[in-house]
Amino acid sequence: MMAELLKGLEVTKAMREKMIFEVEELNSMGITPTLGIIRVGARPDDLSYEKGAVKRCESVGVKVKVFELGENISQAELEEKIKEVNNDSLIHGILLFRPLPAHLNEENIKFLVSPQKDIDCMNPINIAKVFAGDESGFAPCTPEAVVEILDYYNIPVEGKNVAVIGRSMIVGKPLSMLLLKRNATITICHTRTKNITDITKNAEILIVAAGKAKLVTRDYISPGAVVIDVGINVDEKGNLCGDVDFNSVEEVAGKITPVPGGVGTVTTSVLVKHVIKAAKLNNLA
Ligand code: NAD
């Protein structure tokens, strides 16, 4: 039997309805949740992400203000701009596109974004909160998108054997912490992991964030397992594909996310959700 598809679009629809309601509530208190995007230069990747984020924000009534800064801006000028946006009470969440141009020092800057407005989990305070199991901050959007998908499809993680392939600070590690907080038993796999299929075949839920096109085949999966594919790659034909070899795995897995149309679709909605959370944090807390 073919695996059930876990569609990102269904998750975003449900999130959208909830967010519209929350924005209306804030509007009734005179608050318009607002995202401030700080973009240095005009890299096509950033512009494309920005377009998607603006559209998703506006669809639920979240306002967006874009601060476009010259590619050659100095460290001091960028730091000044971040402080200005931090202090702007009408902006609740800040998204700073990275990587920054090479002459700018990201290490200094990540500490500057106010933790209460840091919707993209740039500030180490928010990362530390994820590792401490403290949900008052902002987790990175992609790991949280995975949790949203599991929740929407009523896939419990408590007590489950979960394998995560990938240990980056953007996806693998924080995701493992979010699932640990929900009482899953986590095994983190990486490039030095020995006999990886012994581990993944023992997993009831397998989450793949390796950045290697079609790495995971049916040989990695136990029958009926839930497979969440975080990867975004381009295959030999130029098509978007995940880290999971979908055609091979869908015949064995119980449930599977597609790429495109899976985790990536939900990630932008989590960003918008964070702006609304920030608006509440900055006004109601
Ligand atoms: P990364 O390169 O920083 O980390 C990859 C991790 O996978 C490393 O920890 C590495 O040890 C591990 N790994 C690589 N090859 C492996 C192998 N053969 N066996 C076992 N482990 C292996 O990548 P990242 O930033 O964490 O991103 C991972 C993937 O997720 C990429 O495809 C990226 O494009 C995608 N991504 C998607 C979203 C989204 O919104 N869907 C967001 C961020 C990243």
Image (cartoon, rainbow, N blue to C red):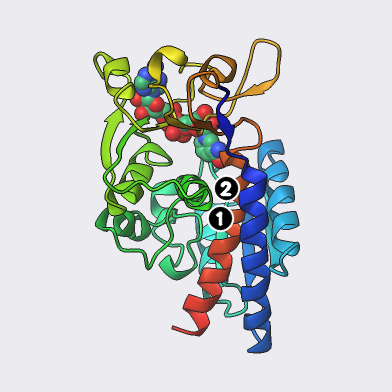
Q: What element does badge 1 sit on? A: helix
> Residue at 46% across / 14% down in the picture?
218
> Residue at 63% across / 15% down in the picture?
235
Residue 92: percent from the left, percent from the top?
Answer: 57, 72
**Number of callouts:** 2
Residue 148 located left or right of residue 204: right
Label 2 CB less than 8 angstroms from ligand 1:
yes
Q: Is residue 71 visible?
A: no
Say which residue label 2 marks.
267
Residue 236: percent from the left, percent from the top?
Answer: 65, 10
Label 1 CB less than 8 angstroms from ligand 1:
no
Residue 251 located left or right of residue 52: left
Asked if disc 2 and disc 1 are in contact, CB closer than 8 Å, the reply is: yes
As displayed, is residue 127 above or below residue 161?
Answer: below
Q: Nearer the viewer, residue 256 or 84?
A: 256
**Alpha-carbon distance for marks 2 and 1?**
5 Å
Say which residue label 1 marks.
270
Q: Is residue 243 visible?
A: yes
Q: Quadrant of the N terminus?
A: top right
As displayed, is residue 12 above or below residue 65?
Answer: above
Q: Residues within 10 Å of mark 1 (few under 14, many from 20)?
A: many
**Residue type pointed to by label 1:** Val
As displayed, is residue 223 above or below residue 278?
Answer: above
Query: Where is residue 78, by image quadrant?
Result: bottom right
As displayed, is residue 206 above or below residue 71?
Answer: above
Residue 132: percent from the left, percent from the top?
Answer: 25, 57
**Residue type pointed to by label 2:** Thr
